[in-house]
Protein backbone atom coordinates (compact mmCIF):
# COMPACT_ATOMS: atom_id res chain seq x y z
CA UNK A 1 0.00 0.00 0.00
CA UNK A 2 1.30 3.45 -0.94
CA UNK A 3 1.47 6.48 1.33
CA UNK A 4 -1.85 8.39 1.68
CA UNK A 5 -3.69 5.45 0.09
CA UNK A 6 -6.80 4.13 1.82
CA UNK A 7 -8.18 0.64 1.82
CA UNK A 8 -11.30 -0.89 3.30
CA UNK A 9 -10.80 -3.88 5.58
CA UNK A 10 -13.46 -6.37 6.55
CA UNK A 11 -13.05 -7.88 9.99
CA UNK A 12 -15.10 -10.95 10.89
CA UNK A 13 -15.65 -12.06 14.47
CA UNK A 14 -16.57 -15.69 14.99
CA UNK A 15 -17.90 -16.85 18.34
CA UNK A 16 -17.35 -20.42 19.48
CA UNK A 17 -20.45 -22.54 19.98
CA UNK A 18 -19.79 -22.72 23.70
CA UNK A 19 -19.06 -19.00 24.07
CA UNK A 20 -21.15 -17.50 26.85
CA UNK A 21 -23.56 -14.80 25.60
CA UNK A 22 -22.67 -11.29 26.71
CA UNK A 23 -21.05 -7.99 25.76
CA UNK A 24 -17.32 -8.13 24.96
CA UNK A 25 -15.55 -4.78 24.47
CA UNK A 26 -12.00 -4.43 23.19
CA UNK A 27 -9.56 -2.70 20.85
CA UNK A 28 -8.08 -3.37 17.43
CA UNK A 29 -4.65 -1.76 16.99
CA UNK A 30 -3.35 -0.97 13.50
CA UNK A 31 0.38 -0.24 13.22
CA UNK A 32 2.46 1.05 10.33
CA UNK A 33 5.96 2.40 9.79
CA UNK A 34 5.46 5.42 12.05
CA UNK A 35 1.75 5.38 12.82
CA UNK A 36 -0.51 3.54 15.22
CA UNK A 37 -4.29 3.72 15.19
CA UNK A 38 -6.67 2.16 17.69
CA UNK A 39 -10.27 1.25 16.87
CA UNK A 40 -12.64 0.51 19.73
CA UNK A 41 -14.97 -2.43 19.19
CA UNK A 42 -17.78 -4.09 21.10
CA UNK A 43 -18.86 -7.62 20.22
CA UNK A 44 -22.35 -8.55 21.37
CA UNK A 45 -22.98 -12.30 21.56
CA UNK A 46 -26.58 -13.47 21.96
CA UNK A 47 -28.21 -16.85 22.26
CA UNK A 48 -28.85 -18.50 18.89
CA UNK A 49 -32.56 -17.65 18.94
CA UNK A 50 -33.01 -14.86 21.50
CA UNK A 51 -36.47 -14.25 22.89
CA UNK A 52 -35.66 -10.59 23.60
CA UNK A 53 -33.53 -7.95 21.96
CA UNK A 54 -32.28 -4.86 23.78
CA UNK A 55 -31.09 -1.54 22.42
CA UNK A 56 -28.89 0.57 24.70
CA UNK A 57 -28.27 4.27 24.07
CA UNK A 58 -26.30 6.49 26.44
CA UNK A 59 -28.13 9.83 26.55
CA UNK A 60 -26.23 12.57 24.65
CA UNK A 61 -25.45 14.68 27.73
CA UNK A 62 -23.77 11.69 29.41
CA UNK A 63 -21.46 10.59 26.58
CA UNK A 64 -18.57 12.56 28.10
CA UNK A 65 -18.46 12.47 31.90
CA UNK A 66 -16.06 12.78 34.83
CA UNK A 67 -15.12 10.35 37.60
CA UNK A 68 -17.91 10.17 40.19
CA UNK A 69 -20.53 11.43 37.71
CA UNK A 70 -23.83 9.78 36.93
CA UNK A 71 -24.34 8.05 33.56
CA UNK A 72 -27.83 7.56 32.16
CA UNK A 73 -28.84 5.31 29.28
CA UNK A 74 -32.12 4.41 27.62
CA UNK A 75 -32.84 0.69 27.41
CA UNK A 76 -35.41 -0.39 24.84
CA UNK A 77 -36.38 -4.04 25.24
CA UNK A 78 -38.16 -5.85 22.41
CA UNK A 79 -40.16 -9.04 22.92
CA UNK A 80 -39.52 -10.87 19.66
CA UNK A 81 -42.95 -12.47 19.76
CA UNK A 82 -42.26 -16.05 20.77
CA UNK A 83 -43.44 -15.51 24.35
CA UNK A 84 -46.23 -13.42 25.84
CA UNK A 85 -45.92 -11.02 28.75
CA UNK A 86 -43.18 -12.36 31.03
CA UNK A 87 -40.79 -11.17 33.70
CA UNK A 88 -37.34 -11.06 32.14
CA UNK A 89 -34.11 -10.71 34.12
CA UNK A 90 -32.40 -7.49 33.07
CA UNK A 91 -28.78 -6.78 33.91
CA UNK A 92 -27.18 -3.42 33.15
CA UNK A 93 -23.91 -1.84 34.13
CA UNK A 94 -20.50 -0.56 33.10
CA UNK A 95 -17.59 -2.48 31.56
CA UNK A 96 -14.07 -1.36 30.82
CA UNK A 97 -12.47 -2.11 27.45
CA UNK A 98 -10.67 -5.12 28.92
CA UNK A 99 -14.04 -6.63 29.84
CA UNK A 100 -13.90 -5.90 33.57
CA UNK A 101 -17.31 -5.23 35.10
CA UNK A 102 -17.01 -1.92 36.95
CA UNK A 103 -20.53 -2.13 38.35
CA UNK A 104 -23.80 -3.87 37.57
CA UNK A 105 -27.45 -3.96 38.62
CA UNK A 106 -30.09 -6.69 38.23
CA UNK A 107 -33.86 -6.52 38.25
CA UNK A 108 -36.94 -8.31 36.90
CA UNK A 109 -38.90 -6.33 34.32
CA UNK A 110 -42.25 -7.35 32.85
CA UNK A 111 -42.16 -7.09 29.04
CA UNK A 112 -45.10 -7.80 26.74
CA UNK A 113 -44.18 -6.37 23.33
CA UNK A 114 -41.79 -3.46 23.88
CA UNK A 115 -40.56 -1.51 26.87
CA UNK A 116 -38.40 1.60 27.09
CA UNK A 117 -36.80 2.67 30.37
CA UNK A 118 -33.97 4.94 31.49
CA UNK A 119 -31.37 3.53 33.87
CA UNK A 120 -28.58 5.34 35.66
CA UNK A 121 -25.39 4.37 37.45
CA UNK A 122 -22.93 6.46 39.45
CA UNK A 123 -19.30 6.01 38.45
CA UNK A 124 -16.63 5.39 41.08
CA UNK A 125 -14.68 8.54 41.97
CA UNK A 126 -11.42 6.70 41.25
CA UNK A 127 -12.38 5.40 37.79
CA UNK A 128 -9.62 5.94 35.22
CA UNK A 129 -10.18 8.27 32.23
CA UNK A 130 -10.91 6.05 29.22
CA UNK A 131 -13.72 4.75 27.05
CA UNK A 132 -16.29 2.50 28.72
CA UNK A 133 -19.36 0.48 27.75
CA UNK A 134 -22.84 0.79 29.23
CA UNK A 135 -24.15 -2.71 28.60
CA UNK A 136 -27.36 -4.63 29.17
CA UNK A 137 -28.41 -8.26 28.91
CA UNK A 138 -31.98 -9.57 28.98
CA UNK A 139 -32.36 -13.20 30.04
CA UNK A 140 -35.40 -15.48 30.06
CA UNK A 141 -35.21 -19.26 30.56
CA UNK A 142 -31.44 -19.13 29.98
CA UNK A 143 -31.81 -17.39 26.59
CA UNK A 144 -29.91 -14.10 26.38
CA UNK A 145 -30.26 -10.90 24.33
CA UNK A 146 -27.61 -8.16 24.53
CA UNK A 147 -27.04 -4.47 23.80
CA UNK A 148 -24.43 -1.80 24.52
CA UNK A 149 -23.39 1.83 24.05
CA UNK A 150 -20.06 3.57 24.60
CA UNK A 151 -19.17 6.70 26.56
CA UNK A 152 -15.97 8.42 27.68
CA UNK A 153 -14.66 9.35 31.12
CA UNK A 154 -12.30 12.34 31.05
CA UNK A 155 -9.92 13.63 33.69
CA UNK A 156 -11.49 16.07 36.15
CA UNK A 157 -8.17 17.79 36.96
CA UNK A 158 -7.79 19.24 33.48
CA UNK A 159 -11.22 20.83 33.66
CA UNK A 160 -10.49 22.29 37.11
CA UNK A 161 -7.14 23.67 35.94
CA UNK A 162 -8.78 25.33 32.95
CA UNK A 163 -11.55 26.83 35.07
CA UNK A 164 -9.03 28.03 37.65
CA UNK A 165 -6.96 29.74 34.96
CA UNK A 166 -10.09 31.30 33.47
CA UNK A 167 -11.21 32.53 36.90
CA UNK A 168 -7.81 34.10 37.60
CA UNK A 169 -7.86 35.81 34.20
CA UNK A 170 -11.35 37.24 34.85
CA UNK A 171 -10.28 38.51 38.29
CA UNK A 172 -7.20 40.20 36.80
CA UNK A 173 -9.32 41.89 34.11
CA UNK A 174 -11.83 43.11 36.72
CA UNK A 175 -9.01 44.50 38.92
CA UNK A 176 -7.51 46.32 35.94
CA UNK A 177 -10.88 47.85 35.06
CA UNK A 178 -11.45 48.91 38.69
CA UNK A 179 -7.97 50.44 38.85
CA UNK A 180 -8.58 52.43 35.64
CA UNK A 181 -11.93 53.71 36.97
CA UNK A 182 -10.36 54.65 40.32
CA UNK A 183 -7.43 56.38 38.63
CA UNK A 184 -9.73 58.41 36.33
CA UNK A 185 -11.96 59.51 39.22
CA UNK A 186 -8.94 60.54 41.22
CA UNK A 187 -7.63 62.64 38.34
CA UNK A 188 -11.03 64.33 37.98
CA UNK A 189 -11.07 65.18 41.69
CA UNK A 190 -7.57 66.68 41.45
CA UNK A 191 -8.61 68.81 38.48
CA UNK A 192 -11.67 70.08 40.34
CA UNK A 193 -9.56 70.99 43.39
CA UNK A 194 -7.00 72.79 41.27
CA UNK A 195 -9.75 74.78 39.50
CA UNK A 196 -11.29 75.80 42.86
CA UNK A 197 -7.93 76.90 44.23
CA UNK A 198 -7.30 79.06 41.16
CA UNK A 199 -10.69 80.79 41.55
CA UNK A 200 -9.81 81.70 45.13
Image: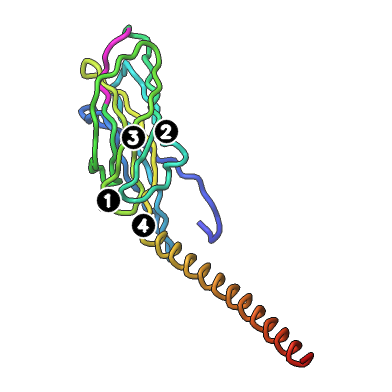
Residue at 25% from the left image edge and 17% from the top image edge: 140
Residue occupied by mark 3: 120
Mark nearer the viewer, 2 or 4: 4
Q: Are marks 2 and 4 in contact (CB under 8 Å)?
A: no
Q: Quote the CA–CA distance across marks 4 and 3.
A: 21 Å
Q: Are marks 1 and 4 in contact (CB under 8 Å)?
A: no
The residue beneath circle 4 is: 155
Residue 89 magenta: yes
How far apart, in angstroms, are the residues tagged by discs 3 and 1?
A: 16 Å
Residue 69 placed where, x, y %?
Answer: 34, 46
Q: Quadrant of residue 79?
A: top left
Judging depth in this view, the residue of 97 and 32 nearest the camera is: 97
Give the number of the mark in front: 2 or 1. 1
Q: Which residue is mark 1?
A: 125
Quarter of the image containing the C terminus?
bottom right
- Asked which quadrant contains residue 83, the reply is top left
Q: Provide the residue designation for mark 2.
A: 57
Q: Are marks 3 and 1 in contact (CB under 8 Å)?
A: no
Q: Percent position (x, y) of residue 158?
A: 40, 62
Q: Secondary structure at mark 1?
A: loop
Amino acid sequence: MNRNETKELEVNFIAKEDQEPGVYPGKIVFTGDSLERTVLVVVEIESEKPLFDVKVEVLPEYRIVYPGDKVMAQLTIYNLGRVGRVDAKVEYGIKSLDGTVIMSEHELIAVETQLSTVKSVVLPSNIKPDSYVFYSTVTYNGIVGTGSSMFTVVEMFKLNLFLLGLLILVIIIILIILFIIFFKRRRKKKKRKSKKSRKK
